[in-house]
Amino acid sequence: MTSNDTFRLLILNDSRDETERLISMLRNSGRPSRAQHVESEEALVKLLQEQEWDLLIGLDTTTNITVSAAIKQIKRLGKDIPVILLTDNEGTPPIIAGLKIGACDVVRLDEDQHLLLVIARELQNHHYRQQQRVADRRVEEAELRSQHLLDSSRDAIAYIQDGMCLYVNESFAECFGYADKDDIECMPLIDMVADSDQGKVKAFLKDFTLKGEDSEGSQLEFLGVSEDRAHIDISVNVSRATYDKEPCIAFIHRIKASANSEALAEQIHQIKQQDLVTGLFNRQYFLSKLQWAISDVDHHSHSLLVLEIDNFESKVQASMGMAGTDMVLGELGSLLREQFNADEVIARFGDNAFAVLLQSTAADLALKKAQSLCEIVDGRIIEVDGKTIHVTFSVGVALINETSCSVEKVIDQAQAAVNDVRAAHGSEGIGDGAKLFEPNVTDEEVGTSAANMGELVTGAIKHNNFRLLYQPIISLRGSEEEYYEVLLRLLNDKNEEISPDNFMSTAVEMGTVTKIDRWVILESIKQLTERRTRDDKSHLIVNISRQSLCDESLVPWLAVAFKTAKLSPDSLVFQIPEDDVTCHLNAAKVFSKGIRAMAGRVSISRFGCALNPMNTLEHVDVEFVKVDGSFTRDIQDNGESPETLTKLIQELHQREKTTVVPFVENASVLASLWQAGVHYIQGYYLQAPTSAMNYDFDTES
């Protein structure tokens, strides 16, 4: 982009005079713009969905629509629009605050020359990002076309790496009598060569590799062996190639076409596009259309809907059987065809999932369509062979626009939205709703700056605008005790949850952390007291802040609270992070001693990151130790050996501590944790935090 190119500009400013001055300054400096003065959040959303924009400039004191709210909407709609924040305040605090909410830079209101340089830089960066995305899309299109040509080629093609078949197409498989190319992939090439020619082929491959570039254009003839052990004469052109970013050797065996091969190929092509159970398009065809939609973003924006059937295995398959399940899927496929136009691509996307590509559809319309579809499906009773079933959908909506550079990214976004729908519902495996994918942003980015975060905290304390979530902690050793960790969330004016990571620092500055801790404790005691009347065995683990740890009045207050509620102190476990314990060792020692004196229990969390973690246990009397989540992540995500975690667990067991391992996100780590002797585990693989203590511990016994 050159300095003379006209750029599209959004301006947030309560003063129309200042807006006009800014536009005039840009014009006089040789920066022509097509500017739009934004006066409300609704107007901004409409503008973002109707046009593409290059830049947003906003004043930090704007009240009609705040800059932080604008950034939230830009992120929600998946737009790449740099934001420059103007301020009339001096010093670094407004700069830090602006960068935290997501602005790319902060400029003093009267420093026009500085502003012009920042505008030039951000427009250039924006242009480079656009070029990068276009290049990424073209590369992916080229790779997809190449893969399609390989898959559909009449010639038998194979890529060989280290003597193994890295890739073969269907023609190559058919040439050797195999029904499926997957039967050959990863098979040693030598297994498809007759014994009499194996030495010849080995020598050729060795010589081909040693010759390097001089070996191009070679030919090899050998006697092949089909799946039924019949001999076949094979003649291949051999060349160097790269497949899936891996260097390899290409084998191409020319096959003569028969007279009716084109008609047959067309029939096969049609069959390959269709899902036989539902009559809809299949996943492979849908992915090709999704790739087209990404290629078309320079002209139109599109939307992807991923629709997953709730509780598919436990409800549909278990009650209807295999044949009945296929009929249910067929009914749902017919229902989907009734709801969408002919130009909207509908496909069976997985065992329990469908996908829809909505062409030239804005975000709000796509979400409304998804919500309407959920209501229609929810109101339909499906009957199969005299049996009826009621199903619901969880629908994730992802936008396909100028920031979309790959099929995988768009699908991941829609799937993340599906997961959010189910997490919000609170019942395992059920969503029965729709959600637009929104990138993970901090609470500062969604409009909770230091000032209004303070207002939120004050209001939450005054009006109990907090919410407690509960995540189960499961025994691996058959213990009958049931534990939940209590997790705190603050609710903003839209009833959206804000995590403590984003509001506790403000609460610390305001000196209100101890009040919040005591609110959590009282609510936890209240919940347990009610459950004890139903002979419930639940125990709660409550997190204590550094400020409460150092509050000498907390332990006496707890004694009164337990006595008033007529609740045993051992029903609550008070949990303190390791770094707080090491920084305030004397206070932690006094606190744990006081809790143990009233027959209560203490836990250390995030354990194992100190230089000498075991030294802490020599001074502070705790019963539970929850190791830091990084140990689990290293095993699950990075493929590291569990030896370090196992050794830590063994040292804790030698000190007779009850161990808890958090962040268990999949089954792969369970065997290692069991062998290490871990007592309890916690994580999303078992259950995400929910607003109710509803985990069925009996299933784990």
Image (cartoon, helix red, strand yellow):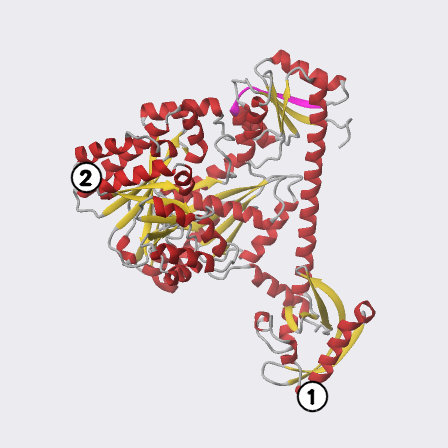
Q: Which residue is mark 1?
A: 196
Q: Which residue is mark 2?
A: 567
**Part of the protein shown in magenta:** 33-41
- Residue furthest bottom in the image: 196
Using the rendered image of the protein, determine whether residue 431 is visible from the camera's viewpoint.
no
**Mark count:** 2
Of the residues shown, which amino acid type is indicated by label 1? Ser
Q: Quadrant of residue 205?
A: bottom right
Q: Secondary structure at mark 2?
A: loop
Instruction: Describe residue 88's horizontal placement relative to residue 494 as left or right.
Output: right
Q: Residue at x 52, y 24 (%)?
A: 41
- Residue furthest right in the image: 214
Q: Nearer the viewer, residue 126 or 671?
A: 671
In the image, is residue 117 part of the stretch drawn in magenta? no
Provide residue 427's location: percent of width, then percent of height. 34, 46
Provide residue 619's location: percent of width, then percent of height. 35, 44
Is 185 placed above or below 455 here?
below
Q: Secondary structure at mark 1?
A: helix
How far, Cα to Cα, is label 1 from label 2? 84 Å
Is 330 placed above or below 171 here?
above
Using the rendered image of the protein, determine whether residue 534 is visible from the camera's viewpoint.
yes
* Label 2, residues with CA under 10 Å away: few <14, some 14-19, many ≥20: some
**First along the sequence among labels 1 and 2:** 1
Provide residue 563's location: percent of width, then percent of height. 17, 35
Q: Nearer the viewer, residue 596 or 57?
A: 596
Of the residues shown, which amino acid type is indicated by label 2? Leu
Q: Nearer the viewer, mark 1 or mark 2?
A: 2
Q: Main secondary structure of the magenta part?
A: strand
Is 686 placed above or below 29 here?
below
Q: Quarter holding the N terminus?
A: top right
Q: Quarter holding the C terminus?
A: bottom left
